[in-house]
Image (tube, grey):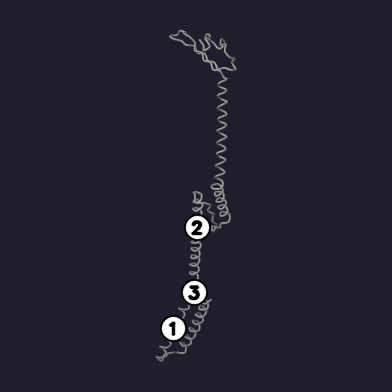
């Protein structure tokens, strides 16, 4: 028996309640030991369900509108304190990348987390600038070392040749003095000494002038 007191239908065709467009129906045969003992009939009017769906939809729309309003309010609050400083920081980083000028610094707008980020960014630029200066100094020292080595080579070579020439002339002069003192100095020996003296002094003068240049 249904809730209205009518006989429970055995099929949807026998149901004589609301039109099918306004109700939800289900009939299930009940069997015990293979024998049909009755039928389970469920019926739900869709009007109440539609009202519930409409109410839930309105509530969802209201909640969604409230969430949008909260997001808009948060964005208005975050714009000057978070978004604007981060955009300024990104712009400063792009300027540094474009110009390679590591002396630029970002302005700190507050003492919150964003301000700490800006401070860390500036500290990183300080480290990069110090490293850049050290690299330039290292390159200068390396270039100076190469210059000194080259100058030393250019100076040592002619001076070494000049020292060799003077040493040879000194040896020849000692031999001539010894022959002179012994009374054995010949004309040929004296002429040979004069030739050696002329060649040695010319060699020494040439290479000393080179070292001076």
Sequence-earlier tag: 1 or 2 = 2
Spot occupied by residue 77 in the image (x, y as percentages of width and height): 55, 44
Within 10 Å of disc 3 (Cα), the crowding (few <14, some 14-19, many 20+) is some
**Where residue 155 is drawn, which disc sits there?**
3
Q: Residue at image x 49%, y 74%? A: 155
Which of labels 1 and 2 is toward the front? 2
In the displayed structure, 99 sits above or below 58; it is: below
Sequence-earlier tag: 3 or 2 = 2
Q: Residue at image x 57%, y 23%? A: 51
Foreground pick, 47 / 116: 47
Which of labels 1 and 3 is toward the front? 3
Q: Callout 2: helix, strand or loop?
A: helix
| Side of 91 where 158 appears, left or right | left
Within 10 Å of disc 1 (Cα), the crowding (few <14, some 14-19, many 20+) is some
Question: Residue extending furthest bottom?
Answer: 183
Q: Callout 3: helix, strand or loop?
A: helix
Within 10 Å of disc 2 (Cα), the crowding (few <14, some 14-19, many 20+) is some
CA–CA distance in space, label 3 to label 2: 43 Å
Question: Residue extending furthest left?
Answer: 182
Q: Which residue is mark 2?
A: 126
CA–CA distance in space, label 1 to label 3: 22 Å
**Where residue 86 is drawn, which disc sits there?**
none
Q: Which residue is mark 1?
A: 170
In the displayed structure, 172 sits above or below 144; it is: below
Foreground pick, 137 / 167: 137
Foreground pick, 12 / 144: 12
Spot occupied by residue 47 in the image (x, y as percentages of width and height): 57, 20
């Amino acid at each position: 028996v249904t809730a209205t007191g009518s006989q429970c239908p055995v099929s949807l065709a026998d149901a004589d309640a609301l039109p099918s467009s306004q109700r939800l129906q289900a009939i299930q045969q009940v069997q015990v030991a293979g024998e049909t003992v009755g039928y389970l009939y469920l019926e739900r009017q869709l009007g109440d369900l539609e009202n519930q769906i409409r109410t839930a939809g309105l509530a969802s729309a209201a909640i969604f509108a409230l969430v949008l309003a909260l997001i808009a309010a948060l964005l208005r609050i975050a714009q000057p304190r978070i978004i604007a400083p981060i955009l300024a920081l990104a712009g400063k980083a792009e300027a540094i990348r474009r110009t390679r000028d590591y002396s630029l610094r970002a302005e700190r707008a507050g003492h919150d987390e964003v301000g700490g980020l800006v401070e860390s960014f500036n500290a990183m630029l300080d480290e990069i600038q110090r490293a850049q200066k050290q690299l330039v100094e290292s390159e200068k020292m390396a270039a100076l070392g190469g210059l000194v080595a080259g100058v030393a080579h250019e100076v040592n070579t002619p001076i070494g040749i000049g020292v060799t020439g003077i040493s040879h002339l000194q040896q020849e002069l000692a031999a001539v003095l010894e022959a002179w003192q012994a009374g054995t100095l010949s004309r040929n020996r004296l002429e040979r000494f004069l030739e050696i003296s002329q060649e040695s002094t010319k060699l020494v003068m040439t290479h000393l002038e080179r070292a001076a240049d």
